C-alpha cells in the first residue's frame, strides 16, 4: 500500500478526533477549556450552520478583551485542528468568537431547536 502525506495527515486528524471524543483521555487543561466553553455556550452563544458545517458562535462585549482571549484560547484547546477567529462588529459593542467544527454537536449534545433555558441538561461523570 502506498501512503501519501495526505493519508498521514488524515490519520493524525482522525486520531485527534477520537481523542477529543473520549472524555476519559482529556487532560485537566482540556477539561477546564471544555467546561469554560460549555458555560459560554449555555450563556451567550449558539451553534449555526454554514455550508452544512456547525459553527460555535460566542458573542461577547468588546470592552472585556481578557474574556475574549480566554474564549478564543479555550476553543483552540478543544478544537486545535480548526481555525478560531474573532469577528469585530463596527456598529455594535460586541465581538463574535467562532470556530467551525463538526465536533460541536458532539460536545454540546443539548443543541437543538428551541430556547436553551427551557432544555433539560444532564452532565455525566
Image: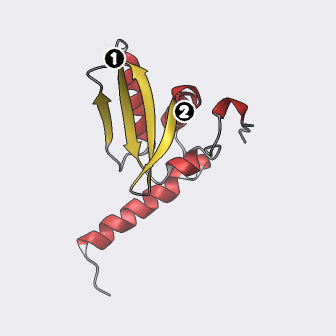
Residue that badge 1 annotates? 65
Answer with the quarter of the image where residue 8 lies.
bottom left
Which residue is label 2 attached to? 41
Q: How many angstroms separate mark 2 from mark 1 (CA)?
A: 18 Å
| Placement of the C terminus among the 4 image quadrants | top right
Q: Would you say 4 lies left or right of 13 here?
A: left
Q: Residue at x 74, y 39 (%)?
A: 122
Find residue 26 and report its image quarter: top right
In the displayed structure, 50 sits above or below 125; it is below
Pinpoint residue 71: horizontal percent, then vertical percent: 42, 28
Question: What x and y, as percent, mark residue 87?
Answer: 30, 31
Residue 75's quadrant in the figure? top left
Quadrant holding the N terminus: bottom left
- Of the residues under marks 2 and 1, which one precedes in the sequence? 2
Q: Are marks 2 and 1 in contact (CB under 8 Å)?
A: no
Relative to 38, 124 lies left or right: right
From where the camera sits, is residue 88 visible? yes
> Residue 107 location, x and y as percent?
56, 46
Q: Is residue 95 above or below residue 25?
A: above
**Residue at 31% over, 32% down:** 86
**Tag 1's secondary structure?**
helix
| Left or right: where 12 falls relative to 33 | left
Of residues 20 and 58, the one nearer the viewer is 58
Q: Residue furthest front?
A: 91
Pick out the residue farthest to the top.
63
Amino acid at each position: 500500500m502506498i501512503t501519501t502525506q495526505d493519508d498521514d495527515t488524515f490519520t493524525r486528524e482522525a486520531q485527534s478526533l477520537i481523542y477529543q471524543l473520549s472524555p476519559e483521555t482529556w487532560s485537566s487543561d482540556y477539561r477546564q477549556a471544555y467546561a469554560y466553553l460549555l458555560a459560554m455556550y449555555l450563556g451567550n452563544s449558539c451553534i449555526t450552520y454554514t455550508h452544512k458545517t456547525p459553527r460555535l458562535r460566542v458573542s461577547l462585549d468588546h470592552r472585556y478583551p481578557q474574556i475574549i482571549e480566554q474564549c478564543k484560547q479555550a476553543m483552540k484547546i478543544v478544537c486545535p485542528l480548526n481555525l478560531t477567529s474573532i469577528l469585530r462588529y463596527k456598529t455594535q459593542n460586541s465581538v463574535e468568537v467562532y470556530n467551525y467544527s463538526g465536533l460541536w454537536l458532539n460536545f454540546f449534545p443539548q443543541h437543538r431547536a428551541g430556547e436553551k433555558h427551557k432544555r433539560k441538561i444532564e452532565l455525566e461523570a
